[in-house]
Structure formats: structure tokens, C-alpha cells
Image (spheres, rainbow, N blue to C red):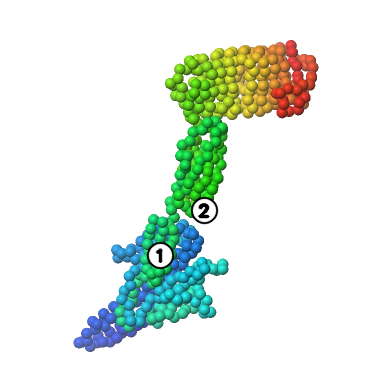
Amino acid sequence: MAANLFQKGMKKLFFLLAAVVWMGSCGDDYDDSALRGRVDGLEDRIEQLEELCQRMNTNISSLQTLVEALQQNDYVTGVVPVMQGGETVGYTISFTKSEPVTIYHGEKGEQGDKGATPVMGVEEIDGIYYWTVDGKPLTDGDGNRIPASAHDGAPGATPQFKIEGGYWHVSYNDGESWQQLGQATGDKGDPGIPGGDSIFASVEETDDAVIFTLADGETTITIPRRQALSVAFTEGNVLEFDVDETKTVHYTITGGTSENVVKAELQNLDGGYTLRTTPTDATQGTIEIAAAIPTVNRVIVSVSDGTQTIMTAISVSGKEEFDGTTISVAEPGTLADLLADYDKTTITELTVVGNLDNRDISTLNGLPNLSVLDMEQVNLEELGGFNSNKILTTVKFPRTLKIIKSWAFLLCSGLTGDLIIPEGVTTIEESAFYGCTGLTGCLVLPESLTTIEKTAFYRCSGFTDIYCKPTTPPQSAVAFESCYNVTLHVPVGSEETYSTAREWVVFQKVCLGRCLQILQICKYSDSWFQNNTPRRVVLLFVL
């Protein structure tokens, strides 16, 4: 608006001068070259003053943004030069929170005797920045200083300048009223080259900050640069674990802000690890990694400061080693490679830790003299593949096991002693232990069991007792055919349910060739049901 008023006034003057030139040109001998030069010069000065006024207002708004950025702990993210005629006349500054601003600077030109550009600045008093003009406080009509930054819940005022009637005018209430300042044009000489130097004297960039020096040459505003985020781990980013081992990783963040947030999560949710992140401050903390049964996985660590986010990873796995009796397998399918340099005929007892697949089971089944196999610390939900192995005498099942596959231990007649199916198993598939005649003593079926498929324990004639922990009879069809003289133990209160369950009635008929007769119901207590009521019901089935 100010520039328009000024331009209109100056254009009137221009037309008046043009009329004089036209009238003078009526004479044949009149030389108007001097007058034309003065008119051309006047147009140049109009354009320079308009640009000067525009840039001053831009710089004032930019200065206010710098003050607010300083008070809000903002960071500079970029400084881009503003070029004009091949020279740098200013910079565009971008921030993490605030909107980008453009500031202009330049060298002063020749000033007229009376013309002077107001020098805007800021002054800090008790943490609050106030506007100054020519080094003196800028005040309102009541003499109160005008804040450049937010104060008492109110935003800072943004002064505006215009040139009118040959004088500078300032408004601190968005143009509602104006105060006259000094003369804008002198009696001779040219106004300062419009470069905004009445606000900013210079802009200096360092690795850590951008320093803005105001026109008084003394007042500076330093705003830190946003540093690129990075994170480092004291213990490194490749870790190997034993079963049930916990490691603490210390991290250090470089860059960012006081708002840094660290998050750790697993790439694969396979149950192998649990994580806990504990920050000490904005730049340091720990990540606790607890391994149950170690798997090959990655801990994804992300760091964010609210404006930028980086991600990195810690590779985790089990220790791959073999001490003659225990072997750790981090990557499924690699057991054969781990045993490649060992004499397999010497392996008679083996504890396996880690992660297996069908290829590894095949490797185990191929060990010619392996008789005792402990897989309790193996991460495996389905197990099969040992059929017709007559060397195995003892097997401990994985704690994670859910399904024993069809024919898993078919005709493994070397298995001896009790057979304890671990808690968590839900299904024993067809013929899983078919013909395991060497099993003697107790068969323990877990509370989690829901299904026993046909002939699962066919010809397991060595069992003397079956401890069935589910209160609801598992679905079963001819699973125990040829299992003679077996005592079935069930939880208290379940005897009627078992004796009337269709599947178990069928099983009794097929198993013994005719309906079983319940000879007696007695009470007893034993360790198999120690977590239930001490008094138990025993159903005795005989031929």
C-alpha cells in the first residue's frame, strides 16, 4: 500500500515534468536532453526506493522470525543464496519448525545530504526482544516499547515502512496508523543501493550455526544448525546369544535436539527375543535384548527428533558352535554345515539349541550312532522325520512344539522308558508313535492336547499308565489299539466325561476287543497332578 501511494505521487510528478518537456519541444531550437535525463533519473530513483521499501519490510518480518526461532530453540536446516545480476544480495533461510524467510543485505551507496534509511534492530531486555529504530526504542502512542517476540501471551508486532511525501513512515499496528520518521530523499546524491543493509549487515555460516549481524554492527543473532542425526552402539551392531542370555547395548546419539526419541523393535516377531529401551537423556541410553531361544533376526532402532528420523539395525543370532555334545544353530538349514568337519560316528548324545527346519531334522536322523537327543531349546512348532530310527533311545521335545507329525517316530523301537509330551502340544497326528514297543512305564499327555489321531500309539504295548491331563477328553479314534493292561488316570471330576465320551468309548472297544468294565473307582494322590486337587480319580480298565 505504501509503495503504491508513493508511486502514484511520483508518477504525478513525472507527468508534470513530461508536460513541461512537451511544451518546451514546441520551439524548434529548444534542447530538452538535460530535462529528459533528469526524468529518467527520477524514474530510476522511484524504482530503487520502491524496492528498498519492499526489502525493508521483508527484512523486518524475517528478523522477527529469527527472534522467534531463537526463543523457540529452533534450528536452521538450510541457507540458500539469493542471486541478482550474478551477485549474492541475500539468503533464504529454512528452519525445522518456522517457515522459511528471506533476508537481504548489501553495501550502502552514496546518501543524499538529508536522505537516510531507518536502521531497524532489536534489543534484548530480560529475555524479551524489543524493536529499535536508529538505535532508539520503537514505542507506541503511550510510550510503551514494541516487542519483537511474543510477550504475555500476545504475538510480537511487525513494523511496516513506507515512503510518503519524501519521508519515511513506520506503522506498528498493521497499517492502521503511521509515524513519520526521517527524510527519505536528499537534495543531492542517490539513495542507498537497495539491498536491505539497513536491517542486516552480514550473514555468517559455520559448521554449527548461522550468525546474523544487524546493521549496527554489534547486535548478533546466532541460531544453531540442525545436525544430522546418527546413532552408535558401544557393543557394536552384531551380537550372538546363548539360550536365555541377556545383553545390554549402550547407544549414543549425535545431532538432533532435546526432543530425541529412540524406539527399538524386532524385524521378525518370532518369539526369540524381547526388548527394553531405557533412555538416560536425549543423547544416551540402553537397549536390553533378552534371548529365549536365539534366532537370526534384526533389532531395528529408529531415532527421531520430531523433524527427521533415521533407522539402523543390530543383527542378532545364536552362537554357532559345537563342543562335542551341544550345538547351537542360528540359521535354519545349516546344521549339516556346522557338523561337516566332525566325525559323525562319534556323536552319541547331542543337545541342540536354536532354530531348525526339516533339513536339520534329516541331518539328525542320519547320525548313525545318536541315541540321546535333547531338543528342549530348539525353536520348532512341528516335529517329524525320525521314522524307522532304531538307534534313538531318548528324545526330549522342543518346548515350543505344538504338533507331532504323522509317522514322526514310526517303528522307533529303540525308544525306552516314559514318554512325556510337553505342555503346548495340541495335536498328535496319525501313527506318530506307531510300533514304539520299547516304551515302558508312563505316557503323559499335556493339558493343551485336543486331538489324537488314529493309531497314534498303536502297538505301544509297554505302557502301564496313561496320565491324561485335559479335563475335556481329547478327540481320539483307535489311537491306543493293542495297548493292553493300561491304567488311565484323569483329573478329579472328569471320570464321567471320559467314560461317556464317544471317542474314548470307541477306543476302549477297539483296543480290547470288547467293552471294558470299570472294576473300581478309587482316590489317590501323585505328583503328576500336583497342581490340581490332591485327590484323584483312577479308572482301571482291564480285559
**Badge 2 amino acid:** Glu
The image shows residue 57 at horizontal and vertical percentages of 42, 71
Residue placed furthest toward the left: 29
Distance of mark 1 from mark 2, alpha carbons? 25 Å
Q: Residue at left 45%, top 76%? A: 136
Q: Position of residue 446 (x, y in %)?
A: 66, 25
Residue pictured at 61% horizontal, 15% vertical: 416
Q: Secondary structure at mark 1?
A: strand
User: Between residues 399 and 20, which one lies in front from this camera angle?
Assistant: 399
Q: Tally the marks.
A: 2
Q: Which residue corresponds to mark 1?
A: 212
Q: Which residue is mark 2?
A: 259
Q: Is residue 402 left or right of residue 268?
A: right
Residue 222 x, y percent position in the rendering: 43, 62
Image x and y of residue 514, in percent: 73, 12
Q: Quadrant of the C terminus?
A: top right
**Residue 78: assigned label:** none
